[in-house]
Image (cartoon, rainbow, N blue to C red):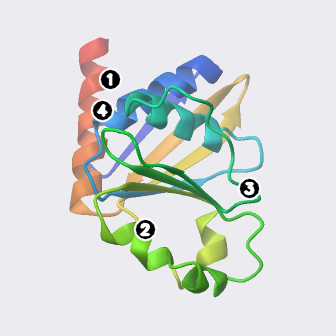
Amino acid sequence: MNRAAFFAQDEDALVSFGRRLAGCLGPGMSVFLRGELGAGKTTLVRGVARGLGHTQAVKSPTYTLVEPYEALTVPLYHFDLYRLGAPEELEFMGIRDYFAGEALVFIEWPERGEGFLPAPDLEIRLAAEGMGRRLDVRACSERGAASVAALAEERALSG
């Protein structure tokens, strides 16, 4: 399965989806997050961090570009490239090193780093739909396809 759509009726449901997503990802995977400002990208990452054992606040790395969460079951790096001046800046900050290990890498606004980012395993597009959020999940690798299938199977089992 290469694509699946999900719906989160509120912020709590989006965090819960992130927790489930964390359980469907393997070490070393990367996820691109797309959506307008306020679509819930950071909220989704908060759920993933919670699913990996993080209990502290999860903040948007809009000004710092990256927020590391290294003391988890699997390290997590959360990038927000919204304020990136030029894609070349990623090279100066050693972006390749973040993808070289076992950490999960989530990137908001990946189009701003085009040409300097490796292809993701998953791409998730978030969009407002009524009071909730629609999540369109697309696999971009074999590992991503396995994650999409696991998410869809979990949804089927939970009814």
Viewer-closest of 129 and 110: 110
The residue shown at (21%, 60%) is 142
- The residue carrying pointer 3 sits among few (fewer than 14), some (14 to 19) or many (20 or more) residues within 10 Å by Cα, namely some
- The residue carrying pointer 2 sits among few (fewer than 14), some (14 to 19) or many (20 or more) residues within 10 Å by Cα, namely some
Say which label, 1 or 3, has the lower sequence index: 3
- Please give the count of numbered marks on the rendered protein: 4
The residue shown at (62%, 71%) is 111
Which residue, given by chain and number where applicable, does mark 4 sit on?
A: 152
Give the secondary structure at mark 4: helix
Q: Is residue 10 left or right of residue 119?
A: right
Tag in front: 2 or 4: 2
Q: Quick check: marks 4 and 1 in contact, CB under 8 Å?
A: yes
* Residue at the limit of the structure toward the front, as seen here: 71
What is the quadrant of residue 43 in the picture?
Answer: top right
Which residue, given by chain and number where applicable, does mark 2 sit on?
A: 98
* Residue 85 visible within the image: yes
- Which mark, by number, is residue 62? 3
Tag in front: 4 or 3: 3
Disc 4/disc 1 C-alpha distance (Å): 5 Å
What is the quadrant of residue 34 in the picture?
Answer: bottom right
Viewer-closest of 102 and 146: 102
Disc 4/disc 3 C-alpha distance (Å): 31 Å
Viewer-closest of 110 and 48: 48
- Which mark, by number, is residue 155? 1
